[in-house]
Amino acid sequence: MAPLRPLPRRRPLTTIHVLPTLVTAGNLIAGVLALAYLAQLDRADPLGDPLFTKAAWMLFIGMFCDAADGRIARLTRTASPFGAQLDSLADIVTFGVAPALLGKTVLDAVFPSVPGRLLFAVSVVYVVGAALRLARYNVEAGRPEGSHGTRTFTGLPSPAAAGVVASLVLVHHELGPNVAAFAFLGVLPLLGFLMISRLPYSHVLNRYLDGRRPLATVVVLVLVVFCAVVFFEETVAVGFLGYALSGIVIGLVLRLSGRREWDGDESDHLEAEGDAARDGAARDAGARDEGGEDERAWSAP
């Protein structure tokens, strides 16, 4: 039998970058606050309690922090696996557990006669889907910087799935509790499966907002902003639901057209990964020369 090889000695983590860490901590804190608000709901009328809507707003705050930490890390060139792992841990709380409990709160309030195990199973499908999505992203991305170069996600990103849940909470008064409950009954498991699917989803910031774009794109964005100002809750709900369903539409179009990739995105992704790998290697070498300061990276799965 071959002798066992000793495990490589890992360099201890002694320093981290403060600013992106604080932003990601804001994401985690928003998720914890959402859970705290749900725990304090009035059991007599949970859907009418202001804390219920506040819990949904915490998810939007978490989304802002999740998008901001990656941008900050890229601008400051602070990249490492530590940031990606911390980001995923925050995401599973804010975009996994909290949205599932938001949906379950609606289901429990509207369907008190339905067995609790069934409603619990609906929420579990969402949580497990979010956890698998985040784990798969960390493994397949390989390098956190890669997400900043790609224009397409594989599977529904967990922040977008949480946005669907939070936006439905915002419009549940207009929909009525019964309609909202039936929506959650179908949406929660659907989102769970979409997150672990191989369907292509557009990276909105990289595809439509970065760099120069046609004038028509700017006009459409102005119209979207106008609708959001006048009909904020409805626009947000339609936007997130439309994005969640867009992966199905794009996947069907690609399948019917016989294409495997969307606008040649994979080559763009691999090129971005190659550039990120070279930059990361140079930064790692510089960090070792300076005494082992750990670099920091963030992504938005």
Image: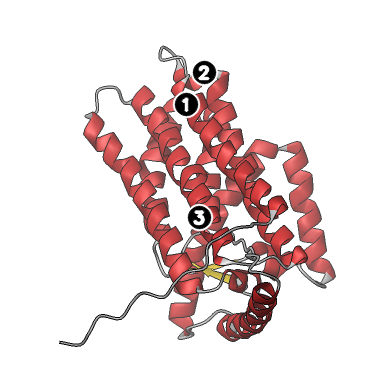
Q: CA distance from mark 2 to mark 3?
A: 32 Å
The residue depicted at 59 percent of the width and 47 percent of the height is 238
Disc 3 residue type? Answer: Ser
10 Å neighbourhood of mark 3: few (<14), some, or many (≥20)? many
Nearer the observer, disc 3 or disc 1? 3
Disc 2 residue type? Answer: Gly
In terms of secondary structure, where does tag 3 sit?
helix
Nearer the observer, disc 2 or disc 1? 1
Disc nearer the start of the sequence (2/3): 2
Q: Which residue is mark 2?
A: 48
The residue depicted at 73 percent of the width and 43 percent of the height is 228
Quarter of the figure with residue 139: bottom left
Residue 274 rendering spot, x and y as whole percentages:
61, 85
The residue depicted at 48 percent of the width and 78 percent of the height is 254
Q: Which residue is mark 3?
A: 88
Disc 1 residue type? Answer: Leu
Q: CA distance from mark 2 to mark 1?
A: 12 Å
User: Which circle marks residue 105 in the picture?
Assistant: none
Q: Which residue is mark 1?
A: 38
10 Å neighbourhood of mark 2: few (<14), some, or many (≥20)? few
